[in-house]
Amino acid sequence: MGHLILLRTMRCYYFEALFDGTKTFDLRLANFDCKVGDIIVFKEWDPIKHDYTGRMLEKQITYVLRSKIDEMFWTKEEIEKYGIQILSLK
């Protein structure tokens, strides 16, 4: 059976970093189902022109972490004060 193919919009500056390899992660609201092995097709979105650029990029999901704020390692107060960083590792 083939992998699920998901279509997602991505703003230009994030798309370019994913395209050139400097961005190796994606942060998304968990409002859709996905699993390791699924394919995501990113469509580049230009927020100034309010239109797609025509560029698309296909990536395979290699890791999924689902979490809710109250299930994280820090208190809500700490998260509100400092925010959260997502690190891309090599």
Image: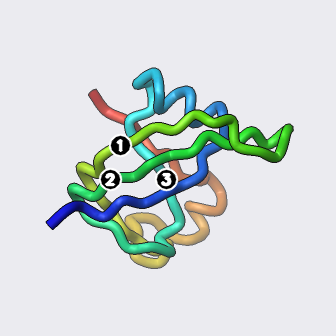
Whether tag 1 and tag 2 are in contact, CB under 8 A, the answer is: yes
- Which residue has dot 1 on it? 59
- What is the three-letter code of the residue carrying label 3? Leu
Tell me, for residue 39, which label it has, or none: 2
Q: Is residue 13 above or below residue 45?
A: above
Q: Position of residue 34 (x, y in %)?
A: 34, 67
Neighbor class of circle 3 (other Cα within 10 Å; few <14, some 14-19, many 20+) is few
- Left or right of 16 on screen, residue 20: left
Quarter of the image with the C terminus is top left
Counting residues from the start of the chain, the first of labels 3 and 1 encountered is 3
Counting residues from the start of the chain, the first of labels 2 and 3 encountered is 3
- What is the three-letter code of the residue carrying label 2? Ile
Q: Which residue: 46% across, 21% down?
A: 20
Counting residues from the start of the chain, the first of labels 1 and 2 encountered is 2
Q: Is residue 41 above or below residue 90?
A: below
Q: Label 3, label 1: how many angstroms apart (C-alpha)?
A: 14 Å
Neighbor class of circle 2 (other Cα within 10 Å; few <14, some 14-19, many 20+) is some
Q: Which residue: 53% across, 66% down?
A: 29
Q: Which residue: 64% across, 31% down?
A: 13
- Which residue has dot 3 on it? 27
